[in-house]
Image (spheres, rainbow, N blue to C red):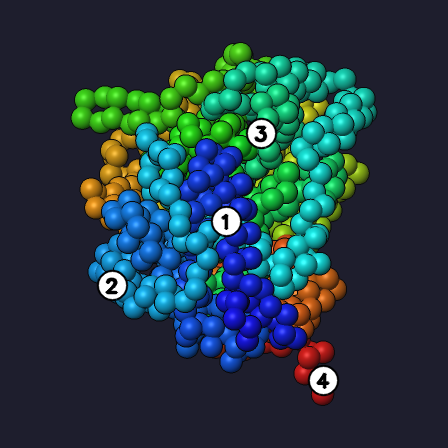
Amino acid sequence: MDDEAVAHVTTDGRKHTLREHLLSTAQMAGDFASIFGFRQWGRLAGLWHDLGKYSRAFQNKLKAAGGEEAHIEARGAQVNHSTAGGLYAVQKFSLAGRLLAYIIAGHHAGLPDWEADSTGRAALSYRLQEEKLLSDALAQAIPLEIIEQPFPSETPMGRDSAFWLRMLFSCVVDADFLDTEEFFEPEKAARRAGYPVLSELVPPFIKYMENKQAGAKQTPVNRIRADILARCTDMAKEPPGIFSLTVPTGGGKTLCSMAFALRHALTHGHRRVIYVIPYTSIIEQTANQFRKIFGEAVVEHHSNLDVTDAKQETARSRLACENWDAPIIVTTNVQLFESLFAARTSRCRKLHNIAGSVVVLDEAQLLPPEFLRPILMALDELRKHYGVTILICTATQPALGPYKSPGFTFEGLKGIREIIEDPAALSESLKRVEVKLPKKLYEPTSWEDIAAGLRQEHSVLCIVNRRDDCRLLWSLMPGGTFHLSALMCGAHRSNRIAEIRASLQAGHPTRVVSTQLVEAGVDLDFPTVYRAMAGLDSIAQAAGRCNREGLLKKGELVVFTPPSRSPAGILRQAAEIGAQLLSDPGADPLAPERFTAFFRELYWVQGNDRLDAKNILSDLSPDQQLRFSFRTAASKFKLIDDLSQAPVIVTYGEEGSRLVDQLEHFGPERWLLRKAQRYVVNLPKYIHRQVCADGGIREIHPGIFVQAHGALYDENLGFCPDRSIVYDPDELVQ
């Protein structure tokens, strides 16, 4: 090789010099960090992140490997090149250098813990003992412009230090990825530059809303929706901060919140809108609606196929990660909040692009109580220090403001500004449903009796709490009844919901049995809705699918107690609190004050310990020696436990089958993974393992599983794990 050190080499011999890579990464990381005021820190961490590549051992290894994979140290026999820069930072800046060391040492394998209790040799305290890695690098001729750097003058006073480090880490790893991508795949890098700026998206949005309002019937509900839209547009001029939008279901909340977000972003210079939805199962409708308006400016990012980790990482999988560089992101609670507490590079890469954004939390009542304190801390940090405006949207506002009582203090979010002038009056004006409760609230009704009641209705939606309940009740219904559950992939659900809408609009008898996935973000309008006992928020959301357009004098919501219990955990507790509150016959079951009482019971009665059940904040609180537990905290912060759920890509329709074939041929390319998310079903892990053992699922790339034969996927029910050893007759033909 030439005398000049090299960072990367392609299989055809092109060389990316190390000096060029370090300077370019430093420049980019500094630019990213400047958004929140820390250009010097970002630049310095980027400049030193690959110092270890100057070592003769690494240069020899790169020459011997002769290709792009050589620099991925997570692959067994590779040379450790990320520790040297961390050691150098500590040598130069003593204790303060540890801040840089976390970032530099973790830029491939992820942010480390300081202590070695659970992470062993991966712990930063252990890695900083490997001084020979630094001496080997410094023995080479490193340019002075790389190693002679002053300590940054920017001071992170008043910030949560663990959160700040994670944001800086994001700047460095994204800059590293992007510069590496520019070298290996310049055509892919060029495609990243095609997004419009946010200001270009306002005219198509205004035109869409004008056309929508011009074509809408002049009903009382539509007049109220127009008033809500005008109020959101007007309030967008307010200074940045935290806002709430309390609009009953059916009030046009999705488009009104986007109107606020766009206008607020333009007024105050925000860079993008991040629209966050609680469930993967309901993200498709919102993303599709936004794509109709904004086209390819929308990136829909789930978490189902975020499968890369340090042990499986390759150059290709690293480049398949999203970094949220589009002007409009539609994502899930899982993707946003797990990323905000992540340690892995693939999860953290996007974080710096949250700075300077408007974040819309749709259906915010579904924030998980056991992680509520860490989540609210992160939101408050984004608001105070990273130029983020937060909009909390729901028909049933959770109790997120500060609260204090004897023996209990809830810090909450201070200074929340409600957009709607009088939410109680708005709720009354949009009241379109009468709630019918069972005479004996705690006495279960059999599925046969529920099915008999549903058969008497011309058009009816029944929402239950469990997938197996949904399938059982559907089996008791007459032919032509629709089934909806998360065992159907997103593409299948979208098609089925379109069929349901068409059937309703045509006036045909339309009966639907569904899980709670229809309760947020799914625009359906039934004259009658049945709802299995659940939390008060879920019952209110079910009411939002009833007489949604206000075309009837009153719709009817029938609440029943099912023969099966709600799933254990928060859903069961919410159902019990809901039953308790509904047992009081003296008040409107869906009055706004009922939700305050519901969430206080759900959040506060058991105290702060329950609101940070995994002690995440303790793991991320440093002592005077700057000892953090990034990896331990990340392993605990799982809104959906990795041990309980696993994804499978199904072969629904021609497109699903084609995507599986392409994934096998091309590998986990970013564009393919993005498309495949609409063909994913999540299974309980134990069922996933069993179906794999039966041959019904196969692993085509590390962590990517696909449906192996056709009988597993039913046109009515979706994925049927119980059919894993039953083959479609066509597949038995040789």
Residue occupying image coordinates x 47% and y 72% = 59
Q: Is label 1 or label 4 in front?
A: 1
* Disc 2 secondary structure class: loop
Tag 2 residue:
129
Amino acid, disc 1: Ala
Mark toward the start of the polypeptide (1 vs 2): 1
Residue occupying image coordinates x 53% and y 46% = 27
Tag shown at residue 26: 1
Residue 143 appears left or right of 699: left
Crowd rating for badge 4 (residues with CA inside 10 Å; few <14, some 14–19, many 20+): few
Q: Give the Cα distance between marks 1 and 4.
A: 59 Å
Tag shown at residue 383: none
Query: In the rendering, at what x and y percent does residue 610 appear?
Result: 27, 39
Mark toward the start of the polypeptide (4 vs 3): 3
Query: In the rendering, at what x and y percent does residue 150 appear?
Result: 37, 43
Q: Give the Cα distance between marks 3 and 2.
A: 43 Å
Mark toward the start of the polypeptide (4 vs 2): 2
Q: Is label 4 or label 2 in front?
A: 2
The answer to whether residue 484 shows anywhere in this view is: yes
Residue occupying image coordinates x 20% and y 42% = 624
Tag shown at residue 270: 3
